[in-house]
Image (tube, rainbow, N blue to C red):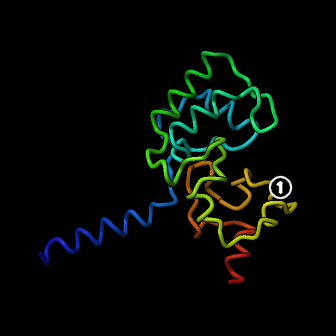
Amino acid sequence: MKSILPVLFTALFATAAQADVFPVPSDAPAIWRSECSSCHIAYPPQLLAKPAWRHLMGGLDKHFGDNAKLAPADVAAILAFLERYGATDGKRFSSANGRISETRWFLKEHSELPATAFRTKAVGSVSNCAACHARAEQGSYRERELLGPAQDHERSK
């Protein structure tokens, strides 16, 4: 029994340390990065459950108030990628309308912040992850990598 404890501890620690890292898969299609990052960062597919990605990609003509409609072949390529790597944990990464900011994971991670923090001039909106997360475009949302407004909030605790 003693020999298994270090293995379990290491596994639990590694999982906790990686809980806020969602590496962008190396086979990410160029169309995903270019189209999605034209308005916001290209969010790692692991930030939403597969059904939420399907919902989101099925309504690009009404994408949060914008028309982000794409050619059917581009939609198919992006959706295939998002479904291949989308979150399998539907409880933590589901959202009825495809908003990452409404998933349990997001709400838990940002529960200490007042809603007004996302409307400051420095941040602008809840979808601007890069305003606070230095490595958001690489899929890292670790607290130790926070920038500006979020870093200031962490220091004031």
Spot occupied by residue 12 in the image (x, y as percentages of width and height)? 34, 67
- At mark 1, the secondary structure is loop
Q: Residue furthest bottom?
A: 157
Q: From the viewer's perspective, is 135 left or right of 84?
A: right
Q: Residue furthest front?
A: 96
Q: Nearer the viewer, residue 40 or 116?
A: 116
Q: What residue would you read off at disc 1? A: 124
Residue drawn at (50%, 37%) of the image: 50
**Quadrant placement of the C terminus:** bottom right
Residue drawn at (55%, 47%) of the image: 94
Spot occupied by residue 52 in the image (x, y as percentages of width and height)? 57, 39
Residue drawn at (47%, 37%) of the image: 26
Residue 56 falls in image quadrant: top right
**Quadrant placement of the N terminus:** bottom left
Residue drawn at (68%, 35%) of the image: 36
The amino acid type of the residue labelled 1 equals Gly
Residue 78 falls in image quadrant: top right
Spot occupied by residue 33 in the image (x, y as percentages of width and height)? 63, 34
